[in-house]
Structure formats: structure tokens, C-alpha cells
């Protein structure tokens, strides 16, 4: 049985913790940051926990990261 390929786009966007949670970066952090308040930029630094309905599909596309 051949190995399953990891979807590289998913690997770049998501991270799976040891406990199986899926984390992603928040959006709105690339450009035009002068328009945003320091509070907003500070809050965007934190990771976003992905909702349960998407977790299964993400984990299937990254089979060896679990």
C-alpha cells in the first residue's frame, strides 16, 4: 500500500497540536496595518482554533501530522 500524500497547502496553513486540536493563523495581517488599531493587531497575533466541522477534512489531508 503506498503512502498517502500530504496536501502541502494545508500543511502551510494549519497546525495540529498533540491533543488533536487544529490551529490556524488569523487573517488581516498582511498589509495596510497602519489602518488598524494596536489592540486589533495584538489580537490577530494569536492562533485561531478551527471549528469541529472542518477538523476531520483537515486531518485527512495531513495524514502523518497527527
Image (cartoon, rainbow, N blue to C red):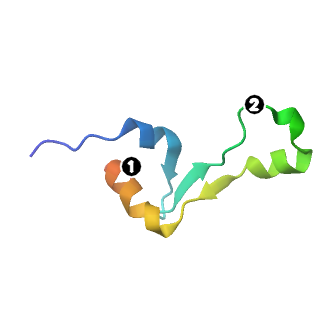
At horizontal 35% and vertical 40% (from top left) the residue drawn is 7
Residue drawn 53% across and 65% down? Answer: 51
Quarter the C terminus occupies: bottom left
Residue 55 position within the rendered picture, expressed as x and y whole percent measured from the top left: 44, 62
Q: Earlier in the sequence, mark 1 or mark 2?
A: 2
Say the numbered circle drawn on residue 65. 1
Mark 1 and mark 2: Cα distance apart in space: 30 Å
Q: Is residue 20 above or below residue 3?
A: below
Q: Is residue 16 above or below residue 36?
A: below
Q: Residue at x 13, y 42 (%)?
A: 2
Q: Which mark is residue 31?
A: 2
Q: Nearer the viewer, residue 15 or 44?
A: 44
* Residue 14 position in % (x across, y down): 50, 47
Residue 62, position as x, y percentages in the image: 36, 48
On screen, residue 55 versus residue 3, left or right, reads: right
Left or right of 35, for residue 48: left
Callout 2: few (<14), some (14-19), or many (20+) C-alpha neighbours within 10 Å? few
Q: Position of residue 36 (x, y in %)?
A: 87, 42
Q: Secondary structure at mark 2?
A: loop
Instruction: Say the numbered circle drawn on residue 14.
Output: none
Query: Taking 41 as reference, is 6 left or right?
Result: left
Q: Among all residues in the image, which is located at the extreme bottom?
A: 52
Identify the secondary structure beneath mark 1. Answer: loop
Instruction: Please tell me how crowded label 1 is: few (under 14), some (14-19), or many (20+) other residues with Cα within 10 Å.
Output: some
Pointers 1 and 2 in contact (CB under 8 A)?
A: no
Camera-nearest residue between 2 and 41: 41
Amino acid at each position: 500500500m503506498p503512502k498517502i500524500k500530504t496536501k502541502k497547502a494545508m500543511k502551510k496553513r494549519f497546525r495540529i497540536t498533540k491533543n488533536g486540536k487544529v490551529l490556524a493563523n488569523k487573517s488581516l495581517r498582511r498589509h495596510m496595518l497602519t489602518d488598524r488599531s494596536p489592540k486589533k493587531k495584538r489580537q490577530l497575533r494569536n492562533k485561531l482554533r478551527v471549528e469541529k466541522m472542518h477538523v476531520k477534512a483537515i486531518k485527512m489531508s495531513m495524514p502523518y501530522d497527527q
